[in-house]
Image (cartoon, coloured by chain):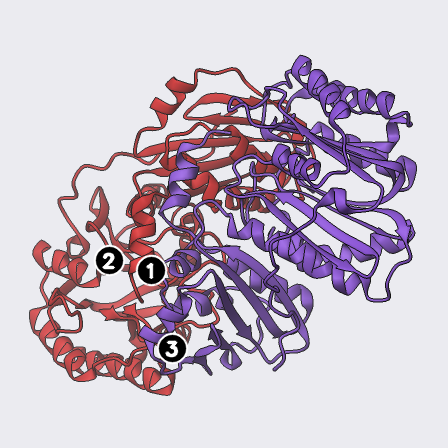
Chain colours: A red, B purple
Amino acid sequence: MSIPVPPVPAFPPVPFTLTSVKGLRAAGVRAGIKPSGNPDVALLVSDGPMTCAGLFTQNHFAAAPVLLSRRHLAATGGLVRAVVVNSGNANACTGVQGEHDALEMCQRVAAAVGCPVEQVLVCSTGVIGVKLPMEKVRAGIDAAIAALSTDVEAGRQFLSAIMTTDAFPKEAGVRVGDATMAGVCKGAGMIQPDMATMLAFVATDVDVGADTLRAVMARIANTSFNAVHVDTHTSTNDTFLLLTTRKVPAPADWEQRLEPVARRLAWLIARDGEGATKVTTVRVLGASSDAVAKRIARHVAASALVRTALFGNDPNWGRFVSQVGNVAEVKAPQKLLCRLQGIEVFRAGEPTPFDRAAASKAMAREDVSLEIVLDEGQGHAVLMTSDLGYRYVQVNAEYTT
Amino acid sequence: MSIPVPPVPAFPPVPFTLTSVKGLRAAGVRAGIKPSGNPDVALLVSDGPMTCAGLFTQNHFAAAPVLLSRRHLAATGGLVRAVVVNSGNANACTGVQGEHDALEMCQRVAAAVGCPVEQVLVCSTGVIGVKLPMEKVRAGIDAAIAALSTDVEAGRQFLSAIMTTDAFPKEAGVRVGDATMAGVCKGAGMIQPDMATMLAFVATDVDVGADTLRAVMARIANTSFNAVHVDTHTSTNDTFLLLTTRKVPAPADWEQRLEPVARRLAWLIARDGEGATKVTTVRVLGASSDAVAKRIARHVAASALVRTALFGNDPNWGRFVSQVGNVAEVKAPQKLLCRLQGIEVFRAGEPTPFDRAAASKAMAREDVSLEIVLDEGQGHAVLMTSDLGYRYVQVNAEYTT
């Protein structure tokens, strides 16, 4: 049976970043929002309106910047001149003051850039329930505007200024002829990234319209950022923006080239899951529908018992299979087949005899594959999950939002 | 707002057990199924047919003993003469041989007791995917039959022989006039107890018919064993049997007196969650329906981020509230109120100022209360969950089913 999604390609270290995209300038500065003193205000500005498609958290407690950016995108039909980001404070659960502050951030950027306020989007990430220190934010925005540059280094500063608990910077990109596709993201939560906001910015310079961009974004999100997030488990601030400056004719295969960039970024987020030692890609094949496949994948990937077994390199087929058995929509459980790192461990209601030590050894890698194969239809789904180890407990029991 | 479910009463050490129920004999013996050599075959026999109501796992991979017991109960309409249990091997994922073995266990007991095979139920718990060592099981059943007794000690041996990874024995009971209500259980998994089977046996001698018993069992399970198990997250072998020998006129309040016994047993299972340091009772009030309330409670209680915060005594309102915000059916999130150990921590979209150190101190207990209060209707739900600490990871990363 063929696997619908190819493995994530091993990207070489990225020699370019957001500012490598034609028409983009970026900056990242230290505004003093983070107690650590690390960069915390980031700005991305294009030399003309970009086309943009956005995907935002579904959480009922969506933060003020999310609500505002969503409104701005809707008002312009997807035209964006600038994106301003602060880290260290999520501006979530901050009431009416939070809404005013998000708007003021956009207004300040719009005034400096010379565009309608609706063409500025804003993202925030960090502690919640605390008002933004607006004096610092204002000064930070002014400094970022002054620092805008097309240098690779400026793009790196942008990335640096969006990070919070990330253990490493996350970027990916590819060049296709004259076109560039590059992205950065932050996020170190995994399948339930509440309070561990994911922000992702993927930019390109291919010339496509807003409708096309939106359709491509929806498809790409499905195998990347939405495949890390288990559905409906989203933080107050999660945002994914796909932007294009439209400077270059779009190569025929631009979507196919862009998708692995987004997937690589999503994989990096899973890899940086709090205390994670590996990313396990759960693939469900042969389900009665894609929706059922997703439900099964989610059930398996979200299980603390499954995730601790993955951490322990324990080829614990019982936990995987039992989670599938808990999904009501599964109709022919007796036909279930389960493979771990390509090794068949379960078939037709009974464990397959396999070399447990060899399977355990095969699991001791940072990229693990768990396949659940049913015989009920064509539905499939892919989900990337982190394992759950001691460091996860340490980070989450001792970190206060 | 009143809390629909009272706190679990602090039971005194139980001076009686299953065998204190009029008409019951029990035994627990060492058959050598467990490598540890601990007792592993248990038998409960009544002097005449008992009335029985049973609740079994919904898992598609329900084990052979579950399928057989379910059939037996249906065939007799709820008449049971004996229950045989083995620990150390779950007889799950064992194919046709497993079905034969489960039947043989019932046949052997039926022949010795002198009853139809359908009046014998069977439960198994332990490793899965391994055939039962039937020679040992047969000898164990014979030894258990020979050891049957009405002594308290025999009841304790029964309990001892059903345990697997349990850190402590679990029993509870109450006397109401002439009637006795007593129960034992095993299980050290929590809200996703896959491969950590819960077995619970609650017996009484009140004279009620099968229909009444079934109705009472359904209500009681809802606030006890089904409130530890998050729905549809059940192991291959989970079984709850409520049995009565019908020797004593039923006191008017027998159901009200029985419910805390079952709830206490369920609480003990949560308390023994792998590596747990406490039980948190999540109460959702004011939801639009009981079903929505349950969905919210489940979403909160199942979150690894919530459970690590509970472990760390971290009054992390953001994680609690954000999980509620991820439930689509919540209609008025702005009215949500959240209380932790009676301390209000969130109201009307913003955190309530509260003494963080005092709240953290209040959480450092084995019985913690988390209330989610909505203003959308009369729906409520209660769920008991363990916290998630270092020991959870240790136990689950290093234990192979």
In this view, B119 is above or below B205: above
- Pointer 2 and pointer 1 on the same chain: yes
In this view, B157 is above or below B322: above
* SS state under label 2: loop
Between the C-alphas of marks 3 and 2, the distance is 20 Å
> Mark 2, chain letter?
A
**How many residues crowd mark 3 within 10 Å: few (<14), some (14–19), many (20+)?**
many
Residue position marked by numbered label 1 in the rendering: A196
Decide which of tag 3 and tag 2 comes sooner along the chain: 3
Kindly identify the amino acid type of the residue bearing the numbered disc 1. Answer: Ala
* SS state under label 3: loop
Give the percent coordinates (x, y) of residue A260: 33, 41
* SS state under label 1: loop
Residue position marked by numbered label 2 in the rendering: A165
Decide which of tag 3 and tag 1 comes sooner along the chain: 3
Mark carried by residue A93:
3
Contact check, label 2 and label 1, Cβ < 8 Å: yes
| Residue B372 appears left or right of A175 | right
Contact check, label 3 and label 2, Cβ < 8 Å: no
**How many residues crowd mark 1 within 10 Å: few (<14), some (14–19), many (20+)?**
many
> Mark 1, chain letter?
A
- Pointer 3 and pointer 1 on the same chain: yes
